[in-house]
Every structure is written in C-alpha cells, then in structure tokens.
C-alpha cells in the first residue's frame, strides 16, 4: 500500500468502518517522501520547503502506524525519504521496530538521517521472518551492527556501502553470516578488499553508475559454488584474483566504453579479458556493444588470448541506451575471440541487435 492509497483509505475510513478495518490491516506498507511531496504539490527543488514537509511526512507515517491494527502482521515495509531532506534517526528506528515486531518479511529502507545516523534494533537479528532486505547508505547515515547475522535472509540489496569494517560499513567478509543468502546486489558500493563467501548464492549483481565508484572495483575473493547468474556493469572491469563459479549458467557484462578517457596502457582491455575468462563456465552470455568496443581496442591482445567461453551455447549482443559513439559493425577479430572456443561449434547461436552487422 503506497501513500496515495493510504491517504485515500484514511479519508474513506471516516465514512465506513469496513474500509477502516481494511486499510488498518493491509500487509504491504509503502511510505515514499517524494510521492508525499507530489501529493501535496511541493516542489523538492526548493530546499527551504523540504524540512517542513519532512516533519509533516514523519507525523503522517507515525499517525498511520499508530492507528493500524496492532494484531496484523506486515509482509512488506518500505520507507523512502530523500537526500534533499534529512529525517530523524529516532523516527526511522521506531519504524524499524514496528516492522520487525509485526513479522516483516521484506524490508526496504532508503532514509537519509542527519546529523545522527540510525541503528538497526538488536531484535532485527532475532527475527526469523525477514527474507528480503534492501538498504541504502547516505554519507554515514546508517550504523552497521556487527556481526550482521540474519539466518533466514535470502535476498540482499546494498547501495553506496563500503566494506572496511568501520561503524558505517560492513566487514570485509560480511555474507558468511547469511547462511541462506541466494540473491545479492551491490550497487555503487566501494568493493576494495571485499570477500564474498556464500554457499547458497545463486544470483550476483554488481553495478556502478559513475567512474569514481568503478575504479574501486577490486575485490579479494568470490566463492559462490551454487551461483548460476552473474551480472556486472561498470566503467572498468571487475578485478578479483580468486573466483569460484562452477555452476555458472548466465552472464551479463556491460563494460562501459568511454572514448573520451583513453585507457591506461591497455589495462582495461586486459582486465576485461581476465574477467571474462573467470566466467568460462557460462552457457548463455550477454555482452553490450560497449564491452565489444573495449575488447576491440587491443587487437594484439585478442590474438594472444584464448577464447573465454568454451561451454557457450548462445551469445547475445545488446545495445545499451545512451551509448556514446555506438559501433555499426562488430569487428571480426572480436567475434572470433568470443566464439571460436565454443564446443558447440555451428550450433552456437549468436544474436545481434537490430542495425548491427556481424
């Protein structure tokens, strides 16, 4: 239930006890500050209005929760504030307490707390119902308790976090305490020194939006013996000396080609090839045209390097939106490098985007 629905439901409940019983026991709660601003016709580009509106938002959420049926459980709880307006850590912690005490299964917290960061309640680590957690960091706005133990968590999304062990970040090996973790997404995180060790992990996604974060894409180790799907997006390849993906099936790689910043002595193409070779067990491979452009920058290296995908059944080339200086033809030497090593030979399927020649 989002804010728009909640607002309408509260208004309707004045006229009908039946509606009151309905909205007060709904299992999915979605409190979004930007939507709240839109419903109140407030332009968030004017900072002087944001603080007052945030106080109204927190009052609204607190009032809503106080009137909710206290015996009803929560399936999904979302709280999203905005970097343009900070909120109080006590408010966020009370929301967390409420969700946890009502058996929350999916918890999505995107809250900018300043000057005092919020902390997860200790009882979070005793809750057995939580299976999905999405968490975003804003300049030291979240204190991470250690160890971060969630025995039944299956899906974890982290954005803008570091892994150096200080109070605002996770430890360098944080996922071994999540024994049932199956899906992990790391978006715009600083990965330097990170170790991923997760025996049940099936899906791993690592992505960056800006070069600043991509230059930190140097990990220590990834041990995921059950991993079947790997997705990577960034300006530079992922550098990780120890990778274990014996069950890998699907791969998506988008190494953003940036012709305005020349590659440093061929390091990026070399690291990209090393990364692809670590994904050698993949059967279904998707590469963006930007990735193809990066590979094409070093013809000599292509000739000297073995084909990375001996088990590949299908290669799909993808045109990413807003690509700078897109290519029209996939170079033959790149295609040979990618496909000649496949054991499927003539039965190998290669799919090109519309308007691109192979």
Image (tube, rainbow, N blue to C red):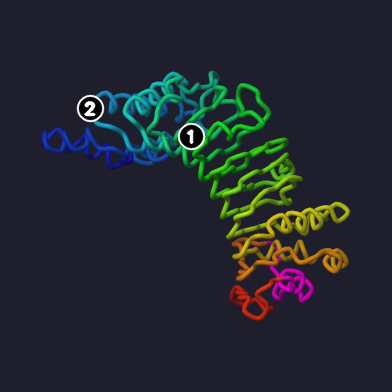
Q: Which mark is residue 71?
A: 2
The nearer-to-camera label among 1 and 2 is 2
The picture places residue 24, in percent across and down from the top left corner, at 22, 33
Q: Which mark is residue 41?
A: none
Pointer 1 local density, CA inside 10 Å: few below 14, some 14–19, many at least 20 = many
Residue sitting nearer the eye, 279 or 5: 279
Pointer 2 local density, CA inside 10 Å: few below 14, some 14–19, many at least 20 = few
The picture places residue 98, in percent across and down from the top left corner, at 35, 25
Residue occupied by mark 1: 110
Q: Would you place residue 127 above or below residue 180 in this image?
A: above
Q: Where on the picture, by quarter, is residue 81?
A: top left
Q: Where on the picture, by quarter, is residue 21?
A: top left
Residue that appears at 51% across and 25% down: 113
Q: Quadrant where the N terminus lies? A: top left
Element at badge 2?
Answer: loop
**Do callouts 1 and 2 mark residues in contact (Cβ within 8 Å)?**
no
Q: Look at the image and give the residue range highlighted in magenta.
A: 324-341
Q: Would you place residue 319 above or below residue 110 in this image?
A: below
Residue that appears at 65% across and 23% down: 166
In the displayed structure image, the side of residue 20 where residue 153 appears, left or right: right
Q: CA distance from mark 1 to mark 2?
A: 26 Å
The picture places residue 116, in percent across and down from the top left corner, at 53, 18
Q: Would you place residue 344 above or below residue 11 in this image?
A: below
């Amino acid at each position: 239930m989002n804010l728009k629905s909640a607002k309408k439901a509260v208004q309707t409940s004045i006229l009908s006890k039946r509606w009151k019983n309905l909205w007060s026991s709904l299992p999915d709660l979605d409190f979004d500050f930007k939507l709240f601003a839109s419903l109140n016709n407030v332009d968030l580009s004017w900072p002087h209005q944001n603080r007052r509106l945030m106080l109204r938002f927190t009052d609204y959420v607190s009032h809503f929760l106080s009137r909710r049926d206290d015996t009803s459980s929560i399936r999904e709880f979302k709280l999203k504030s905005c970097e343009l307006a900070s909120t109080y850590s006590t408010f966020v912690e009370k929301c967390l307490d409420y969700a946890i005490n009502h058996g929350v299964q999916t918890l999505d917290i995107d809250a900018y707390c300043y000057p005092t960061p919020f902390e997860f309640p200790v009882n979070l680590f005793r809750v057995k119902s939580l299976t999905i957690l999405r968490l975003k960091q804003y300049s030291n706005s979240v204190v991470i308790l250690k160890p971060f133990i969630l025995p039944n968590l299956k899906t974890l999304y982290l954005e803008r976090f570091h892994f150096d062990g200080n109070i605002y970040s996770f430890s360098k090996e944080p996922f071994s305490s999540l024994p049932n973790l199956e899906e992990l997404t790391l978006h715009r995180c600083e990965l330097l020194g990170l170790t991923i060790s997760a025996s049940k992990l099936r899906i791993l996604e690592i992505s960056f939006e800006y070069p600043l974060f991509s230059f930190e894409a140097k990990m220590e180790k990834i041990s995921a013996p059950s991993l079947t799907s790997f997705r990577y997006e960034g300006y530079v390849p992922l550098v990780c000396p120890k990778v274990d993906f014996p069950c890998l099936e699907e791969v998506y790689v988008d190494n953003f080609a940036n012709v305005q910043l020349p590659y440093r002595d061929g390091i990026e193409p070399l690291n990209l090839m090393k990364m692809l070779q670590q994904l050698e067990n993949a059967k279904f491979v998707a590469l963006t045209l930007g990735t193809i452009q990066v590979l094409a920058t070093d013809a000599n290296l292509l000739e000297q390097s073995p084909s990375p995908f001996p088990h590949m059944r299908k290669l799909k080339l993808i045109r990413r939106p807003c690509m700078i200086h897109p290519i029209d033809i996939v170079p033959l030497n790149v295609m040979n490098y990618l496909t000649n090593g496949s054991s499927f030979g003539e039965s190998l399927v290669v799919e090109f985007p519309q308007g691109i020649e192979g």
